[in-house]
């Protein structure tokens, strides 16, 4: 899938929106800008052991991305019809798969410039528009965020007008239609077990 491949290559920019706690409750753009510095600081600590670095990156990702909100939007009506146990299992599997797939991408970040263009806020929802400056192109990425207390949490990423949530809704929707919710969970569990057994060598694959 063309969009998914593009997304995988750009996920480094996405995870640079991982978090640090806000002292004075800044807005979404300010939180995003501050957390870029936090992630870059981890990446620049060359003396960190690989496992320690990955644990710190993992904590940073999980602190900024609202996987429950993201999961609910991906599953749409299937979320409403799922049991609490199914919901919890999906969120756990989905977040683990994303983390395992893309931490290698974060670690291979090569100092592409990230320009924070503007924020658009409506109530407790916001979009932070950015540009990723590569050697050959400027790629627009918009982070959709929801306010949870003092924090602004990412629940969707839009790359060149294509929504991450919509993409996965379509992909998982086919499995849900043909195999049901438990069938989707089984597929996700198998994928995670395969990654844990064989590793993915930093190569992202679809969750």
Image (spheres, rainbow, N blue to C red):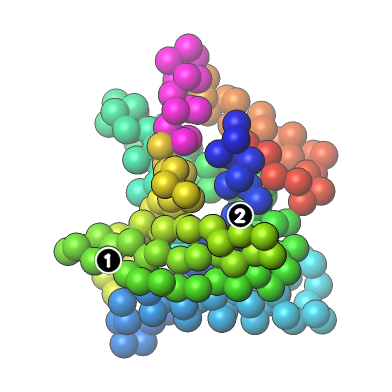
Q: Residue at x 35, y 71 (%)?
A: 118
Q: Quick check: is 24 in the magenta stretch?
A: no
Look at mark 1 in the image and give the residue it sits on.
Answer: 120
Residue 70 rendering spot, x and y as whole percentages = 40, 47
Compared to residue 184, the image places residue 151 above or below, namely below
How far across and down, in percent of the image, does residue 2 sit? Answer: 60, 35
Q: Earlier in the sequence, mark 1 or mark 2?
A: 2
Q: Nearer the viewer, residue 197 or 143?
A: 143
Could you say which disc has been placed on residue 56 in the image?
none
Provide residue 37's location: percent of width, then percent of height.
56, 81
Name which residue lies at 27% across and 70% down: 149
Which label number is shown at residue 10?
Answer: 2
Left or right of 124, for residue 104: right
- Give the CA separation, mark 1 to mark 2: 22 Å
Range of residues picked out in magenta: 167-181
Instruction: Kindly indicate the quadrant of the structure image that contains residue 74.
Output: top left
Instruction: Indicate the quadrant containing the N terminus: top left, top right, bottom left or bottom right.
Output: top right
């Amino acid at each position: 899938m063309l969009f998914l491949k593009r997304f995988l290559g750009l996920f480094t920019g996405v995870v640079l929106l991982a978090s640090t706690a806000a002292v004075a409750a800044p807005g979404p753009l300010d939180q995003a800008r501050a957390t870029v510095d936090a992630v870059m600081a981890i990446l620049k600590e060359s003396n960190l052991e690989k496992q320690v670095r990955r644990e710190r990156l993992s904590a940073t990702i999980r602190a900024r991305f609202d996987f429950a909100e993201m999961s609910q939007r991906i599953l749409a009506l299937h979320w409403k019809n799922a049991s609490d146990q199914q919901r919890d299992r999906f969120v756990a599997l989905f977040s683990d798969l994303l983390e395992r797939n893309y931490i290698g991408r974060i670690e291979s970040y090569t100092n592409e410039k990230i320009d924070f263009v503007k924020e658009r806020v409506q109530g407790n929802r916001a979009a932070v528009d950015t540009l990723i400056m590569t050697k050959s192109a400027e790629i627009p990425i918009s982070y959709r965020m929801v306010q949870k207390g003092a924090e602004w949490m990412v629940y969707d990423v839009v790359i060149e007008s294509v929504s991450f949530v919509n993409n996965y809704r379509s992909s998982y929707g086919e499995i849900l239609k043909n195999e049901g919710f438990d069938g989707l969970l089984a597929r996700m569990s198998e994928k995670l077990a395969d990654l844990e057994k064989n590793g993915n060598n930093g190569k992202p694959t679809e969750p």
